[in-house]
Image (spheres, rainbow, N blue to C red):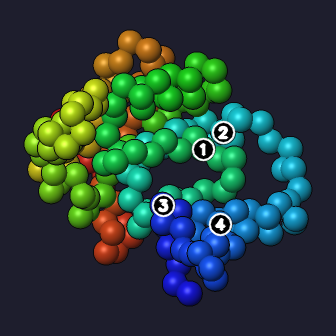
Amino acid sequence: MGMTTSASVPAGPEGSIAPRGTVTDRLVDANEAYAAAFTDPGMDARPVLHVAIVACMDARLDLHAALGLELGDCHTIRNAGGVVTDDVIRSLTISQRALGTRSIVLIHHTGCGLENLTEDFRHELEDEVGQRPAWAVEAFRDVDQDVRQSMQRVRTSPFLVHTDDVRGFVFDVKTGLLREIDPA
């Protein structure tokens, strides 16, 4: 049987739901195996490296592997595009003020899906569901410029106390390399 998403549950014999047939079921099974061998690492929520990373949610970005990070090293905040939105500022503020981070790394990437969207996406959603989303799409055409904009949003936020070590990068999905973006 092929794997399905949790949104579509395959029917088994006589129309019953097939056991463990969804992606979510597979994840729950994997968690049970993980938990069987799990030991409490004895860490708290404060990242060892005092860094928060804001990155795109793109499934091709394995941030821990790409940056040589271990469990407990950083806070990771991900969203579509890795853009700095009000919710990202919220998370960064908590990360800094309550949990001791001092550095912020912003990571966008090549071939991002937001480069192919516009704010028309919101209008299409409104037409379809009858309600306009409260959030902006935050689409962009120039990934470097969007990283600069994100760095500026972080540096000018009145809620963040540590804005002297904010750096932005573009991750190349073909080579795995980071390219630093000059904020100017």
Q: Residue at x 59, y 75 (%)?
A: 15
**Camera-side residue of 167 and 40:** 40
CB of mark 3 within 8 Å of CB of mark 2? no
Report, in whole angstroms, how far the alpha carbon at label 2 lies from the one at label 4: 30 Å
Q: In this figure, which residue is indicated by the disc labeled 3?
A: 7
Kindly report which numbered mark, 3 or 4, lies closer to the viewer in this rendering: 3
Local secondary structure at mark 3: loop
Q: Residues within 10 Å of mark 3 (few under 14, many from 20)?
A: few
Q: In this figure, which residue is indicated by the disc labeled 2?
A: 47
Local secondary structure at mark 4: helix
- Residue 66, position as x, y percentages in the image: 49, 64
Checking the image for residue 74, the label placed there is 1
Kindly report which numbered mark, 3 or 2, lies closer to the viewer in this rendering: 3
CB of mark 1 within 8 Å of CB of mark 2? yes
Query: In this view of the protein, can residue 149 be seen by the observer?
Result: no
Tell whether 8 sits left or right of 106. right
